[in-house]
Image (tube, rainbow, N blue to C red):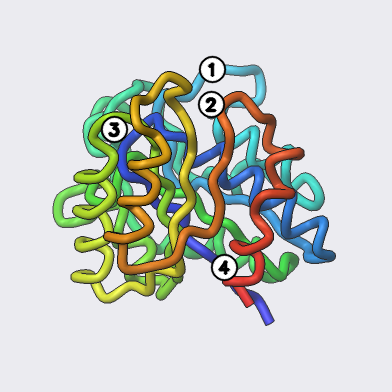
Amino acid sequence: MNRAVFIAGTDTGIGKTHVACALLHALRAAGDRACGMKPVASGCMETPAGLRNEDALALQAASSDAPAYALINPVALRDPLSPHLAAAHDGVTIALPPLRAAFEALSASHRRVVVEGVGGWLVPLAPGLFASDIAVQWKLPVLLVVGLRLGCLNHALLSARAIAADGCQLLGWIGNRIDPDMLAAEENLASLRALLPAPCLGVLPHGMAPEPAAALLHAAVAALG
C-alpha cells in the first residue's frame, strides 16, 4: 500500500527539505521504496537540462532511485519569489491536475512519496489556490517542520490550527534546530510539546547531514504506519 505524507513548514527557510531528505533516508533504511517530490519550486537555476531547483535535486538524490526530475518537480519557476508571483513572471499558471499526474506516476513505483510543500501552509500558488490545497485535495497526512528559532511557538501553533481547520490530519511535528544560538531552546521545545496538538516525532541537531539525521526519525517512520 502506498502511504504518502505532506511536509509542511512553519515558514520558508526552516529546513523542510532537510527533514524530508532525512525522512527519505529513514524510510529507505526501514526497507521502503521511497521518493521525494516538490510539486512547485521557485528560485530555480538555468542548466543545460532546463530549470533545476536545489531542494528538488536534494530530494531526487535522497530517493530510492533516480526518478525523472520532471516528476519530482513538475513546476519549476525562475524567480525566488512566492510561487504565484514567480509563476506570473514566467507566464505559467499553476494548477493541481498536472501535479497530481506526476504524484500518481511516482506513487506507482514507490511505496512512500514524501511531498514537500513550498514556504508555509498558506503560500499562494495561483488565484484561489494555496500550497495547502495539495495536502487537502490529495488527502495527505501532514508532518509539520518547526524551525527552532525565536517566534517558533506562534508560527507552530498558527500552522497547526490552520492544518486542522483545513481538515487535514497532523501526524506530528519535527523540530529543526536552525538557530544554534537560540535562547532557552529546551524550554521552547517543552512548550511546543505541551501546546501542539500532535506528538513530537524527532528533533534534528543543527548542522547534521540528512543521512545521519535519519537515525533520529524512527518515531516519524512509525507514525506513517
Circle 3 or circle 2, nearest the eye = 2
Three-letter amino acid code of the residue under disc 3? Gly
* Amino acid, disc 4: Ala
The mark found on residue 145 in the picture is none
Name the N-terminal-most of marks 3 and 2: 2
Q: Which amino acid does label 2 sit on?
A: Leu
Q: With 66 as the anchor, is 126 left or right in this view?
A: left
- Which image quadrant for residue 66? top right
Q: Which mark is residue 91?
A: 3
Which of the two discs, 4 and 3, sits closer to the camera?
4
SS label for mark 3: loop
The residue singled out by tag 1 in the image is: 46
In the figure, is residue 115 to the left or right of 118? Answer: right
Residues under labels 1 and 3: Cα distance? 16 Å
Q: Where is residue 126 in the image (x, y as percent from the top left)?
A: 22, 47
Residue situated in front as seen by the camera: 137 or 91: 137
Q: Nearer the viewer, mark 1 or mark 4?
A: 4
- Residue 90, given in percent of the width and then of the height, sits at 32, 28
Q: Which residue lies furthest to the left in this view?
A: 127
Q: Mark 4 points at which residue?
A: 4
Q: Which residue lies furthest to the bottom in this view?
A: 1
Q: Nearer the N terminus, badge 2 or badge 1?
A: 1
Crowding around mark 2 (Cα neighbors within 10 Å: few <14, some 14 to 19, many 20+) is: some
Residue plotted at (57% across, 40% down): 204
Dots 2, 4 in contact, CB < 8 A: no
Give the residue number, with chain letter if any, for mark 2: 51
Q: Within 10 Å of the Cα at label 1, are there few (<14), some (14-19), or many (20+) other Cα atoms?
A: few
Question: Mark 4: which secondary structure?
Answer: loop
Identify the residue at image location x=45%, y=42%.
Answer: 75
**Distance between mark 2 and mark 1 Cα atoms:** 5 Å
Q: Which residue is drawn at 52% across and 55% down?
A: 115
